[in-house]
Image: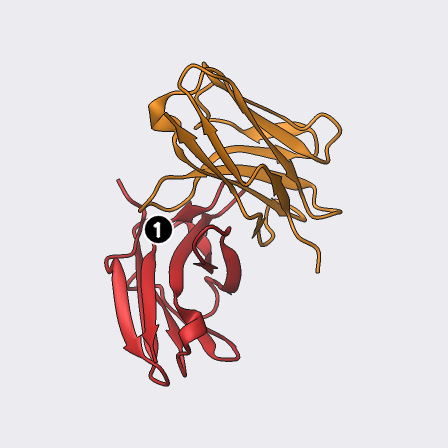
Chain colours: A orange, B red
Amino acid sequence: EAEVAQSPRYKITEKSQAVAFWCDPISGHATLYWYRQILGQGPELLVQFQDESVVDDSQLPKDRFSAERLKGVDSTLKIQPAELGDSAMYLCASSVGTSDTQYFGPGTRLTVL
Amino acid sequence: DQQVKQNSPSLSVQEGRISILNCDYTNSMFDYFLWYKKYPAEGPTFLISISSIKDKNEDGRFTVFLNKSAKHLSLHIVPSQPGDSAVYFCAARPTGNTPLVFGKGTRLSVIA
């Protein structure tokens, strides 16, 4: 069964350092999402791509976060510099289209010290 | 302002009994609802969904009920199994190309 792949699974970094997360969506899924989930909360959308284009990045803290999906397939989410409050689970999801069911990857657990 | 509310942070049920997880929403523009299950250290797994034009959808042991007038949906799991122990998230999608809105989740514990 096709799955969304993410790496790394865990990342520990010190504040002010740069971190990057990678996501490979299910083959054929044009829509890709990055979510952040803080413990005890539901996932919150950071950015949504349709192919290589950003559809929604209204909740992305653009002073420190960036995301790209250059070839419309895999995607990278970067944080620079990381802050203590960025500690969370970062989830990637994909769907065939914007109205279709989203399937999530295993996530990257980020701890900022 | 939370648009999707799961008011019970946790629920314990005995194996074999019915588990009922509840979700309330405030936005009448939501037209599609989903339930996801999440185990620790894993991403959410899609479980079941329902369109706003329906009031019930069933898949094996899982049934979702939608009461639009009350802006309430519920997930029924029967019979509950120990492997069902996880955090369950309710999610809703507004009409149009807008993102899912998730509740905070309910932790279900099925006791053998």
Q: What percent of the width, then of the height, locates residue B54?
A: 47, 69
- Residue type, mark 1 in image: Gly
Q: What percent of the width, then of the height, locates residue B20?
A: 32, 73
Residue, x 42% and y 21% (percent of image)? Answer: A14
Q: Is residue A93 above or below residue B49?
A: above
**SS of the residue at dot 1?**
loop
The residue marked by circle 1 belongs to what chain? B
In the image, taking residue B102 as reference, residue A30 lies left or right, namely right
Quadrant containing the C terminus of chain B in the rendered view: bottom left
Q: Residue beneath label 1, please? A: B103
| Image quadrant where residue A87 sits | top left
Q: What percent of the width, then of the height, locates residue B31?
A: 46, 55
| Image quadrant where residue A33 sits | top right
Q: Is residue B105 visible?
A: yes
Q: Nearer the viewer, residue B65 or A85?
A: A85
Q: Is residue B72 visible?
A: no
Residue, x 45% and y 14% (percent of image)? Answer: A63
In the image, taking residue B35 as reference, residue B28 lies left or right, namely left
Residue, x 71% and y 25% (percent of image)? Answer: A70
Q: What percent of the width, then of the height, locates residue B70?
A: 28, 64
Q: Is residue B70 above or below residue B14?
A: above
Q: Nearer the viewer, residue B64 or A41?
A: A41
